[in-house]
Image (cartoon, grey):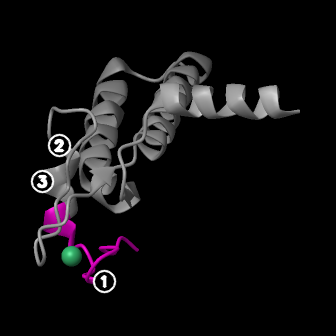
Amino acid sequence: MNRCSNCKYEYRYEDMFTASWKLKTPAPAPCPKCGKMHYISSHRMMKIYMSAIVINLLIMLCVNLFHIHSLVLLTLYILSLILFVIYIPILNKVTEFPESFNKVRLHSINEQERQ
Ligand SMILES: [Zn+2]
């Protein structure tokens, strides 16, 4: 459940959908009620894309193992693409601050220096 950290407004599906398909990183997702800036979690986004790659590999593996017709493969890909577009706003998460993989690396380096 995605909620605004300021006014506790619960993000609707439409809010998440428009924020999820912005071609910016970090993707801004301002609160529609109070306007406080939130961002789509890039860590969650990476997990979603990795799982999509794994699902596509499994589809390809099934097609090769069971010698399924290429039209079935095409249908499976189109269906998975439609499901991907529908479910990304549900799976995404908003964060108060933009996440960066470099910051995570910096954080882990700092922790290593402390020990
Ligand atoms: Zn708000």
Q: Main secondary structure of the magenta part?
A: loop
Sequence-first tag of 1 and 2: 1
Residue 22, by quadrant, is top left
Residue stretch rendered in magenta on the structure: 1-15
Tell me whether the residue at label 2 lies in contact with that at label 3, contact meaning CB atoms closer than 8 angstroms. yes
Image point (35%, 35%), residue name: 76
Q: Which quarter of the rendered image does ligand 1 occupy? A: bottom left
> Mark 3 is on which residue type?
Thr
Q: Furthest residue to the right?
A: 115
Q: Is mark 1 within 8 Å of ligand 1?
A: yes
From this view, report whether residue 35 is shown above or below residue 103.
Answer: below
Residue 21 image label: 2
Residue 72 image offset from top left, x and y in percent: 35, 30
Q: Is mark 3 within 8 Å of ligand 1?
A: no
Give 70 or 60, whichever is nearer the viewer: 60
Q: Which residue is mark 1?
A: 8
Residue 84 image offset from top left, x and y in percent: 32, 45
The residues tagged by marks 2 and 3 sit, at their Cα atoms, a distance apart of 6 Å
Q: Which residue is mark 3?
A: 18
Q: Is residue 7 magenta?
A: yes
From this view, report whether residue 65 is shown above or below residue 36.
Answer: above
Per the image, label 2 sits on a secondary structure element best described as loop
Nearest to viewer (mark 1 / mark 2): 1
Residue 77 image offset from top left, x and y in percent: 32, 31
Tell me whether the residue at label 1 lies in contact with that at label 2, contact meaning CB atoms closer than 8 angstroms. no
